[in-house]
Amino acid sequence: MDHFTSSDPPHADVRKAPAQDLLALANFEHEAPLSIADTAHGDSWLSYGARSLIASVRTAEALERLHAEPHPAEPLDLTGLEPADAALAARLVELIVGADLRLDDEMTTIVHRLVVRLAGHPDRPLQRKAKDIRIAAAIAWLALSGSGMIGRRQSRGVRKASFVWDAFGTSSASDLGQTLSYALRHPEGRRAADSRPHDPESVRLPTVPLPPLDDPTLLHSRHRASLLEQRHDLKRRIREERRSCMERHPVQILPSGNARFATSPTTVRWAIRSPDENGRSTVMIATGDLDSMKLTSISVTDAHRLIAALECALNEPLASVS
C-alpha cells in the first residue's frame, strides 16, 4: 500500500460506513490486548522491548512457557559421548568446579549441561588449540553471563568478568565464550545452519542484541524469575498502551452505546487534481488557515467516494452526537 492508496472502506455503501466503523470500535474494546509476539511484530514504542524479551529465550512460545523453578542438581552425564569427548568434558568440569567461583547446585547443573552439549556438538567447538584451563574459563563465563551474573559493575549477585579470569588465572576468554555461544545456537552444526533456507518469520523482525544464552534449561532460576517480571511488566504496559490508544481515539464509544466525536473544526480552502511523484492522478485538498494550512492527498477513487459521502451527509437528517 503506497501513500496515495487508501485501505478498504468500512462498507461499500457510504451510508452504512459510519455504523460499520462504530461497530468495529465497539468490538475492539472487548478484544483481548495484543500478545507480546504481536507487539514484537509491530512498530510501537513497546516493540523493541518485546523483541528483546523474546530473544532472551529464543521464541515467544518459550517466553509464555517460562517458569522460575530451580533446576535440580544433576550429576555429570557423559552417556553418548565419544571416549575422547567424554574425557575432555570431565576434565573441563573438574577445572570449573575446582575454581573458586562459588557456584550453587543449580549453576553446577547448568555447567554440566553446557559442557555435555558442547562436547557432543557436531562442530566439536571444544577441540581447540587453547589450553583446557582457558576453555573452562570461557564456559564458566558463558554460564554466569548467560544468567546475568556477569556485568560491568559489581553488585549483589553480579560480578565483573575479571572475577572469572582471576579464578582460572588466565586472561579474558570472552571471545572464545562467544564462539561457544554461537555453537549452542546452532546445535545442528554450522554447515547445516548455513544451508538451511531462511525462515521469513525470522528475518521479518529488526535485529536485537542476542544474549549469551537463550535456552531456559541453561538459565538460572533467579534470571528466569527476572525475565518473568519483565514479561509481566510488558503485558501490563501493552494493556495500558491499548487503553491509552482507545482514549486518544477521536471516536469514543460510551457505556450507553452512544458515540462521542472529538472533532477539529476547519475550513476547506480548495481542492485540485494533481499527479503524485509516480505520475498517478490524485486530488489534493487544502484545509485550515493560510498560515497553518494542511494538505491531504487522496486517490481519485476516494475523491468520488468523498463526494458521495458528503452528498449523503447533506441530504440526511442531523445526527445526534454527544
Image: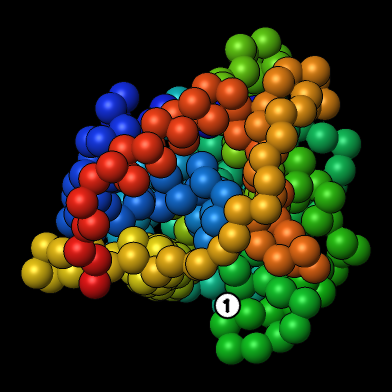
User: Tag 1's secondary structure?
Assistant: loop
- Name the residue beneath numbered marker 1: 102
Farthest residue toward the left? 256
Q: Is residue 71 above or below residue 308?
A: below
Give 251 or 194, whichever is nearer the viewer.
Answer: 251
Looking at the rendering, in which quadrant would you find the N terminus?
top right
Residue at 68% x, 46% y: name it. 270
Q: How crowded is mark 1: few (under 14 residues within 10 Å), some or many (20 or more)?
A: few
Q: Where is residue 99 in the image (x, y as percent from the top left)?
A: 67, 69
Give 227 or 88, whichever is nearer the viewer.
Answer: 227
Q: Is residue 136 above or below residue 309?
A: below
Give 110 or 237, whichever is nearer the viewer.
Answer: 237
Q: What's under tag 1, amino acid-wise?
A: Arg
Please identify the quarter of the rendering in which residue 141 is found: bottom right
Please identify the quarter of the rendering in which residue 3 is found: top right
Residue at 67% x, 10% y: name it. 195
Q: Position of residue 96 (x, y in %)?
A: 64, 60
Whether residue 25 appears in this view of the structure is yes
Looking at the rendering, in which quadrant would you find the C terminus?
bottom left
Residue 280 relative to residue 25: left or right: right
Residue 225 relative to residue 318: left or right: right
Q: In this view, does 274 lie above or below 108?
A: above
Residue at 31% x, 38% y: name it. 312
Residue at 28% x, 42% y: name it. 315
Q: Where is residue 208 in the image (x, y as percent from the top left)?
A: 67, 49
Give 131 or 213, whichever is nearer the viewer.
Answer: 213
Please identify the quarter of the rendering in which residue 206 is found: top right
Farthest residue toward the front? 315
- Total marks shown come to 1
